[in-house]
Structure formats: C-alpha cells, structure tokens
Amino acid sequence: MKTSQFYIYRFSFNRYLFEYFIQYFNTYFNIMSTKIHNQLNCADMCGEPSRLIAIVLAAAVGIGITCSVFYPGIMSGDSLGMYHDAITGYFPGEGKPPMTAFLWMIVLKIIPSPFGPLLLQNVLFWGGLGIIVYSCRFGPIGSLVGVFAIGVFPTVFALLGILWHDVLMAAVLTLSVGLSLLYERTKSKLLLSAAFATFWCALCVRLNAFPAIVPLAVWLLALHFQITERNAVRVRTFIIVLIPLLLSMLLVSGMFSRLLKKGPGSAARSLQFSLYHDLAGMAVYSGDLRMPSHVHQSVPNLTLDMVRNVYDPADINILIYTNKQWDSEAFITSKKRHFQELVRVWAGAVAAHPGAYLHRRWDAIATILQIRGVFYPFHTGIDSNAMGLQFKGGPVYDRLIQWLHKTQGLFFRGWLFGSSAILIVIAGIRLRRWSAVAVCSSGLMYIVPYFVVSTGSDFRFIWWMIVSTLLGALLFFCGSVSPSDTGCTHSSCPTT
C-alpha cells in the first residue's frame, strides 16, 4: 500500500515538474522569439534608404514589364469607344462617366498612342503598391518580394495591361490606400488631401466606386481624428465630418461628369441593361414575358421562346446586341418616357414573381463571382477599329495568355477571394488590424450593389475586390509596427 502511494506521489511530482518545464520553456521561447523579432524589425525598419531604393526599383521594373508585355495596350470595344472620345475631345457619356476619356485626353497630348493610358494606369498601380509595401515591416529583400508577389500575381497581372476604366479605378484606389498609409505615418495634411482627392477621382472614373470608397474614407478619417476607445467623444465630430464629406464627393463628381459631357448620354443607359436582363430572366423562370410597349412595337413577334433562346445569365449582349433577330436599338432607348415605362414594367414583374426575381439575381451573383465557371476573365489584343490601332503581341504575351487560359479555373474564382476577404475582415477586427479591415471591406462593399443591379458578369467588374483582398492580406500579415512595439528608439523607424 505504501509502495503504491509512493509511486502515485512520484508520478504526480514528475507530472508537475514536466508541466512546469513545458510552461517555462514556452515562456522562454516566446520572450526570445519576441526579442529576435523586434531586432529584425528594427534592422529592417532602420534600413529605410535601402528599402526605399528596393521598392522604387521593383515598382519601376513592374511598370516596365507590364508595359512591354502588353504594349501598346489591350483594348476592347469599350476601350476603343473611350479612346475615340479622348482623341476627339467629345464626351457623349453613353452610360459611362467621361472621366477616363478626359484623363486619357490629357495623357494623349504627351504620348499620342494607347501606350500613354497604359503607362498612366500602371504608374498609378505600381506606385500605390510600392507605397503600401513601404508601410509594411519588410527589409529590402522582403520589399522586393512584396511588390512582385502582388503585382505579378496572375489574377492581377492579367488585367494590368487592359485599358478598362475598371482597371484604372482599381489603380487609383490602390494609390489612395498607399497615400492613406503614408498619412498614418506622417500625419501630413497634404497627404490627407491627396488621399481624398484620389477617392474623388476613383468616383469620377466609376460611379459604383462609392461603396468601395466609404470604408477607406472611414478608416482615413478615424486616423485623422484618432478614434479609439479612450476618446470616443470624438466620434460625434467624426460622423459630422464624414457624412457631408462623402455626400459632397458624390455631388461634386456628378457635377464634374455633367460638366464634361457634351452629348445626351446618361447613367440610365447602363441601368437599362440590368433591367432588361432581369426581365428576361424572370420571363424564363416564371413563363410570364413582360416588356415595355416600345420593345413590342420594335419587335412585334417577340415571344417567350425567343427570349429563352437568347437568355444567358452571364451575358446581356446576346439579348441586346449580338442577336440577329432584332436591332439593338429595339431595347435601349434615350427617351425618358420609355425608360420610365421600363422601370414600371420591371417593378411590376418583381412584385408579381418575387421567386423568379430572386432566382435571376442568384444567377447574376453566381456568374459574377465565377461560381458556375469563369466568364470573360480578360480581353486579348485590340478589337477591329477604324482608328488604325493594332496589337502585334509577342512570344511572351502569347505564352502568358495560353497559360492564363489553362489556369483560369484556379486564379479567376471571385468567390475564393471574396471568402478570403470576409475572413480577413473578421480576424482583422478581432486583432485590430484596421488597415486590412478597411481595404478588404472596400472590395466587399464594391460588389454589394451587384446583388441588385448588374450589367454583366465580366471578371473586371470584381477586379478591385481581387486586388483589395491581396492588399488586405499583405497588411494583415505584414502590416507596419510602431517603435513602441519593437523597442526601437531610432527616429527612422515608422511610428504607425
């Protein structure tokens, strides 16, 4: 009996020693790893000149590679239309804000070819990316890797050479994130103004950029007012400034677009595509074909079977443009009374068949997020045109496109990036990585309107969500640290 008790006590004592040893080793390991980590951070951060040189070189090389591979720039029909507006100086505003063509017009006066707009959007993107990496805790080598890891990521690089206003908007927002991070470090009012100027520019380039701007503006103003749990009193002032500022940007961008427009075009033209797509989808799913009277007048023999044959959840162009059974102008109208009737017919169809409407909207989301396959991930070459613009390409470009087509099922799945962004936002809120939260929220907010209104399922429509997810991941895992975190007392280290 005494022997058994002895072994029990001995076992308990050994178990206690073992647990104590494990706990002591774990504590010692954490302390030593923290010290090493702090020393590495200090070494990296204090090497500011070498980091800056590495980032500038990486961004310059990225610009050079992109422009050389895609020279003089990939152009679809939309690109050619905006390019024509830029060289003529006439902005009809046919469903698209004229800001892109206006910026191109300025650049074309210096570089009179598509290479000018190509260079512009890549300088904005790679410059913004370089600033973002500069804010992270990287050494010179890490900075090089950080810039190229995002810049040449297949989903990003594939669209950097395409002259779309979607890509230009994402490039501008990338720069705005970089300027916001610089403001976080320096508290310079000039950088604060520049960041909000880029917000406004992105809003002028694409009207639906507004939801994407809101999280970034909230984050930037929170940095400015130093909103924390301890000074929650400033929240009222923060809100008082935020709401009028956002509304004023929206108002001024609209006024600027109207000032540039010289034709009868309006944003209602783009909305018509979404409404007609919904009407076609609801007709297919409910068996009830509803169209405005002017459509029936233009196509008197229009039947449900005809609509069913040309309905594609991912592509409205088959119904409107590429269908040989009727003229494209049979649907799209510039008359106000026709548009008002279209809205009434659409609202009546939604009220009569809510289930069919939800089915149609799910179709739209499933195709936009590339859940049911990959639709129009990128454009190639330059479409035929009367301006003499041609794309010759080269062996590097040809091999790149072949590889992208083979791997598009892996890299061009929007839902994967969206899911990752949601996880980063949740983890970022718990760990207070607010820069990552703001950037990923921007990408997620950008696609929210597509749940109600969408004009197609082109991958470019969600490209900012892709870019913002990658940037958010970078900021989440490698975001900047302050000297108080690292124990560094050198003035050259960042203070964020």
Image: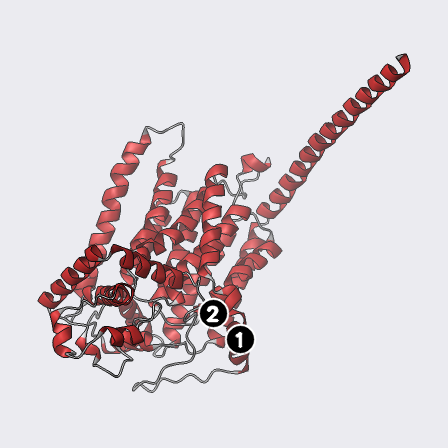
Task: Specify the label residue 158 is tagged with.
Answer: 2
Can residue 60 be seen? no
Q: Earlier in the sequence, mark 2 or mark 1?
A: 2
The location of residue 392, given as percent across then percent down, is: 45, 85
Pick the quarter of the image with the N terminus.
top right
Read off the residue under disc 1.
Answer: 400
The residue at the far right in this view is 3
The residue at the far left in this view is 337
The location of residue 56, given as percent across then percent down, is: 51, 60
Can residue 221 be seen? yes
The location of residue 206, given as percent across then percent down, is: 29, 61
Q: Report which quarter residue 117 is drawn in.
A: bottom left
The residue at the far top in this view is 2
Q: For the point 85% across and 15% down, which residue is it? A: 5
Secondary structure beneath dot 1 equals helix
Secondary structure beneath dot 2 equals helix
Question: Given the image, on which type of amino acid does mark 1 rest?
Answer: Leu
* Vertical comparison of 458 with 129: above or below: below
* Vertical comparison of 141 with 315: above or below: above
* Vertical comparison of 167 with 68: above or below: above
* Vertical comparison of 197 with 326: above or below: above
Circles 2 and 1 in contact, beta carbons < 8 Å? yes
Is 103 positioned to the left or the right of 291 in the image? right
Task: Specify the label residue 87 is tagged with.
Answer: none
Q: Separation of disc 2 and disc 1 at Cα?
A: 9 Å
- Of 261 and 139, nearer the camera is 261
